[in-house]
Image (cartoon, rainbow, N blue to C red):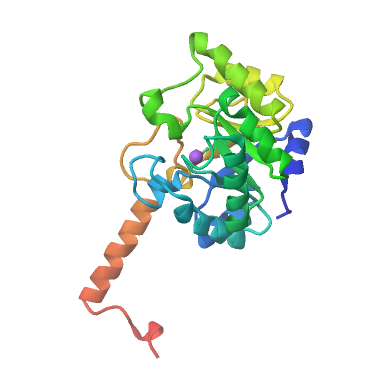
Amino acid sequence: TKVTRVHHVAQWKSEGRKFAMLTAYDYSTAKVFEQAGIPILLVGDSAANTMYGYDSTVPVTVDEMAPLVRAVTRGAPKALVVADLVFGSYEASPQQAVEAAADMMKRGNCHAVKLEGGVNIAEHIRAITNAGIPVMAHIGFTPQSVNGLGGFRVQGRGESAEKLRADARAVQEAGAFSVVMEMVPSDIAGEITRELEISTIGIGAGNDCDGQVLVWQDFAGMTTGRTAKFVKRYAELADELRAAAVQYAAEVADGSFPDEDHSF
Ligand code: KIV
Ligand code: NA
């Protein structure tokens, strides 16, 4: 596995090379994904859901996120580790955004931060990048605004396509090195990808983005219950883990574990 840093992401776009990103929230998982050659790991605030069991990303705090980020950077020293700024930590002003980003870089020991928003947050992105901190933007469906957006809805359909384009241009202009596009129509995501110089990373944004991202518990089948249409399950880890726990408990109950091979 090669070391990945932000300049590689620009290089891949010019080479037309598609890339995969996954979320990670702990040392062991980050290590596995680095071994698999996943070049970018996102410590997403989806940790609110996957690690802390909240029903949205709104309540998660920096104190809850920062230890996860540190663990991922230790588990995957060669990956580009990007950490989400949490809701409420950066929106008030460009100055607040710089402070939140610097705090996350210091406490997480990561390589870049991600934040949500387009035109409305462009000045903040400019201020953070001026401070020497690489920014990944996130437009389209932005989960931190779920209460304002009125639920999980595809963004950029019909007339709002122009807003999405304007957001994409604004974050590029502000200095973001890449932009996540979440739940937007494939054709518009493709148009934006071709128009922008920076890399686009899709989640529910079709096949024409430069990169793709999924939440690891979703892609690995660790999530139980309903998952979004854009999720493809590449494994069924929850089923496997549950079966293993059932067998372990049964063997303890019937006295067959530990056997001689696992005893001193
Ligand atoms: O928090 C997260 O996992 C994300 C990705 C889904 C892009 O922001
Ligand atoms: Na996020």
Q: Nearer the viewer, residue 199 or 130?
A: 130
For the question of whether residue 33 can be seen, the reply is yes
Q: Does 106 appear above or below 252?
A: above
Residue closest to the far top: 159
The answer to whether residue 236 shows anywhere in this view is no
In-image side of 108 versus 247 (left or right): right
Taking the spot 57% from the left edge, 12% from the top edge, the residue there is 162
Please say if 211 is above or below 155: below
Residue 167: where, in percent of width, then height? 60, 22
- 228 shown above or below 27: above
Quarter of the image that includes the N terminus: bottom right
Say which quarter of the image contains residue 247.
bottom left
Q: Is residue 222 left or right of residue 250?
A: right
Determine whether, in the image, residue 146 is placed left or right of residue 185.
Answer: left
Residue placed furthest toward the left:
254
Q: In the rendering, at what x and y percent does residue 198 appear?
A: 71, 30
Residue at image location 61% in from the left, 17% down from the top = 165
Image quarter in which the C terminus is found: bottom left
* Nearest the eye: 111 or 35: 111
Work out which residue is located at the far bottom of the displayed protein and give it. Answer: 264
**Residue at left 43%, top 30%?**
145
- Number of marks in picture: 0
The residue lying at 54 percent from left, 61 percent from top is: 71
Q: Nearer the viewer, residue 28 or 118?
A: 118
- Please tell me whether residue 100 is drawn above or below residue 75 in the rendered image: above
